Image (spheres, grey):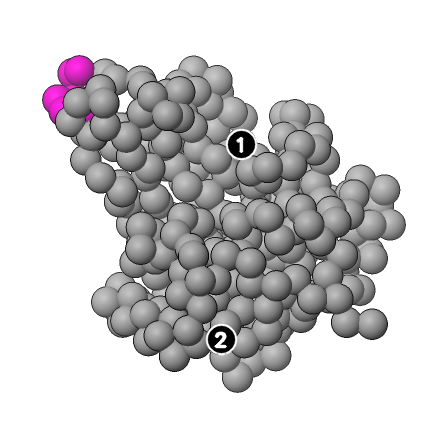
Amino acid sequence: MEKIRKASHAGSWYTDHPQELAEQLDGWLRAAGLAKSSDVRGVIAPHAGYSYSGSAAAYAFGNIDPTNISRVFLLGPSHHYYTPKCALSRATVYKTPIGDLPIDVEVNDELKATGKFEFMDLRVDEAEHSMEMHLPYLAKVFQGYPVKIVPILVGSLSAESEALYGRLLAKYVDDPKNFFSVSSDFCHWGSRFNYMHYDKSHGAIYKSIEALDKLGMDIIETGDPDAFKQYLSETDNTICGRHPISVFLHMLKNSSIKIKIRFLRYEQSSQCKSMRDSSVSYASAVGKIDA
């Protein structure tokens, strides 16, 4: 029995018009001008509405060579539903306006058998945007290639749980047919986010935000999950995909293939100049085999 997850944010967070969406994605991918590489095995990409982060996300998805990949693991944070665990989808298909992505039910069952995952119900699944915003890009990049997805909603994990899920998922990194799409925006700054860290030594507020984000990005590039944890506890930076990123770092640390993360793009939704302003930062990275 097919169980469908609708493209619930199409028509609001991005266009639900197939041709318009395809042209938009093509345009952003062309503008990023990146060469596809089979060494790219994962990405970190934003998940805001496409009018905000669509162009930045192209710097992650534009690197993907779909030729030998048959499965994409999607790791996204939970914005509305609280769980101290990771949750799998009950759906068998994720719809997008430009093509549907079937779920790898066998891998879902394999993960469920570990006893460490729960299932989210369809209502929770469709309310969450963090993984959905990656789907049209994946559908575009993998057009004409048979690919299945394994969506994993990453809850509010403890440091121990992040390490545990990282160890559980590490074996999938060792299979070159697997790819990883990690969903995160970076600093959410302003009174509406309850976060107004400002180091005046950097100049304008937006420069301080950039310095804060870039420090985090540099630490993520080292691949050290403990250093990233330390950075988060010292700065409280409002990186909403902190848990998926941490799990991914633990996966890479525990896999036998060496993969290096490199950030290629950084943008802000607007430049904060006064304490009344607000912004969200977007960063795109690739995880590439480190020869």
Tell me which corner region of the image, top left, top right, bottom left or bottom right, holds residue 18. Answer: bottom left
Mark carried by residue 98: 2
Mark carried by residue 64: none
What span is in magenta? 200-206
Separation of disc 1 and disc 2 at Cα? 36 Å
Q: Which residue is mark 1?
A: 225
- Secondary structure found at label 2: loop
In the rendered structure, which amino acid carries the disc numbered 1?
Pro
Q: Nearer the viewer, residue 134 or 170?
A: 134
Name above or below for residue 229 compared with residue 174: above
Of labels 1 and 2, earlier in sequence is: 2
Q: Position of residue 143 (x, y in %)?
A: 50, 79
The quadrant of the image that shows the C terminus is: bottom left
Is residue 6 among the parts visible in the rendering?
A: yes
Residue lying farthest bottom?
A: 144
Label 1: few (<14), some or many (≥20) within 10 Å? many
24 sits left or right of 161 in the view: left
Q: Nearer the viewer, residue 201 or 82?
A: 82
Q: Is residue 202 magenta?
A: yes
Tell me which corner region of the image, top left, top right, bottom left or bottom right, holds residue 190. Answer: top left
